Image (cartoon, helix red, strand yellow):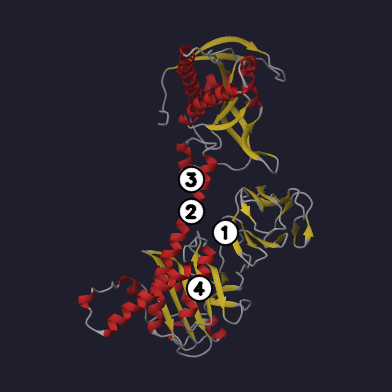
Amino acid sequence: MLSSCPILGDFRLARLLVTTPDGAQREHKLRAINTLGRHPEQTIQILDRVVSKEHALITFADDAYWLQDIGSRNGTFINGTQIRGRTRLADNDTVTMGGSRIVFLTEDTETNQRLSGNVTIHAVASETAIRSRLQAREAQQKEFLPEADILDEHTLRTDYEKLRVVFEVNQAIGADIDLDTVLNRILDKALEFSSADRGVILLLNDDDVPEPRAYKNRRGNDEQMQLSSTILNEVLEQHHAVLSSDATMDSRFGGSHSIIMQGIRSTMCVPLMAGSSLLGMIHLDTRIATGVFTEKDLQILTVFANEAAMRIENVSLARRAEEEAVARSSLSRLLSPNLVEQVVSGGVSMDKGGRIRNATVLFIDIRGFTSLSETIGPQETISLLNEFFEIMVDIVFRHEGTLDKFIGDELMAVWGAPVEQTDHVERAVRAALEMRRSLEDWNRFRVANGVNPVLARTAINTGEMVAGYMGSTKTLSYTVIGDTVNTASRLCHHAKSGQILVSDPVTSALGDRVKYESFDAVKFKGKSHDVNVYNVLSFDHGSYEPADD
């Protein structure tokens, strides 16, 4: 049941409400890292000539969102004061960039947040008895009759009216896929069809609480609008369309203080149904006269709402597909295709903040690359590296690892971050063994074609490391750092061609499932103790199969 509360409800994530100088308004959900600016590659593009291409950065850290100007020409302001350095954002802060106004909204159950029209839900003063119900699905379930079955003019006119409404909705919305724009066009058309002087479209949020997404008032959008929880609960719980020709007298809403207080004479509220799923509702009312809305108005609005719900759902699906495509594009540079699909679908989580992770890191590089590159031309050097990395990255992804970075002729990969894996050590070692076999096959091909073989060395280490997005405010990338990573890098530089060097943490994790060749302990610079070194020869058995290509 809805009680006395702000209608916006709870937000799982913070968001920005951006209004550009031309009056256009768009809402953006914030991620862990958000870049703001005029350039289309920014996370949130702001179409304002005074805004810099790369203007500001918003990041989430320490349970808060932080705003930082990144060298913009005209500065960034919070509540009229120009910021210097990293500044914490508070709920309802107004950020000014150029001529654009940005409102920061956070999750806060006690904050009385309102949409532009100050729309709120008001509690009922007493329990309301609802005696009559109008099934909103009736108009949806009635099909058009074949021409031969139409026996009277009334049926013909009813079917024509349904077609007209559907046509008008589609004409008004067009092919736009911006949800806020679509909702405002739907509401404009709903007010046009009816004699209402106020209207609001509410959509259910992730907690199934209705929140206003579009509001119109013929007398001006600054007027406060209170909605009755009595009416909304009837739509929410029963999926009924509600009509009152005189809400101040209607027995169904006898206990609704908000209706009486505002003197509303006529009210219609219909659900937005996509199949059997409730997306939200359209609420219209008027204070002009009694009996403005009729049963026919309710039927027409219901048909209108059914068509509008289909368009809203299609827009939401299109927006989700667009977001998933962007996510896939970004993640595909980092993760294997199989993991990309799992992350996008929500099957596995991906950490977006810096934290301590237990993971496994692998380094592989070309031994003697400097000398090799001096004997061949620049084009052949680039071609060789691309071919080498192509083979190695495919193997990393086959074993569901994460590509960390390329460092000259060296490749760095990690298992267990950002996606958690319980068998990350095994996956890394199996990937290294496959890399060695694939390199042997590639070298046989090169030698057969009269080209010198490529010699590579590999090292693996496992343990705690810091994982997260690092870099400057303009260029951030996901990586891992720490003593575990440094040791793996030094093991790689210590290895000879064809070797896969590991230390005690790897052998302890895999035990006798792996055959090793032991070497003397090595003293690395900066380490307080010697490091035991082993060369991996083979893997006897394992608990998983690599992903298919």
Mark 4 vs mark 1, foreground winner is 4
* Between discs 3 and 2, the one toward the N terminus: 2
N-term-proximal mark, 1 vs 2: 1
Q: Which residue is mark 3?
A: 344
* Nearer mark to the viewer, of 4 and 3: 4
Residue 187 disc label: 4
Residue picked out by circle 1 = 11
Residue 135 visible to an observer of this rendering: no
Frontmost residue, 18 versus 450: 450
Circle 1: element type = loop
Q: Say whether marks 2 and 4 touch (CB < 8 Å).
A: no
Q: Nearer the viewer, residue 49 or 508?
A: 49
Residue 425: x percent and y percent? 51, 26
Element carrying mark 2 = helix
CA distance for labels 3 and 2: 10 Å
Name the residue: 45% across, 89% down. 291
Q: Amino acid at mark 4?
A: Leu
Residue 312 position within the rendered picture, expressed as x and y whole percent measured from the top left: 45, 64
Of mark 4 and mark 3, the one earlier in the sequence is: 4
The CA distance from mark 2 to mark 4 is 23 Å
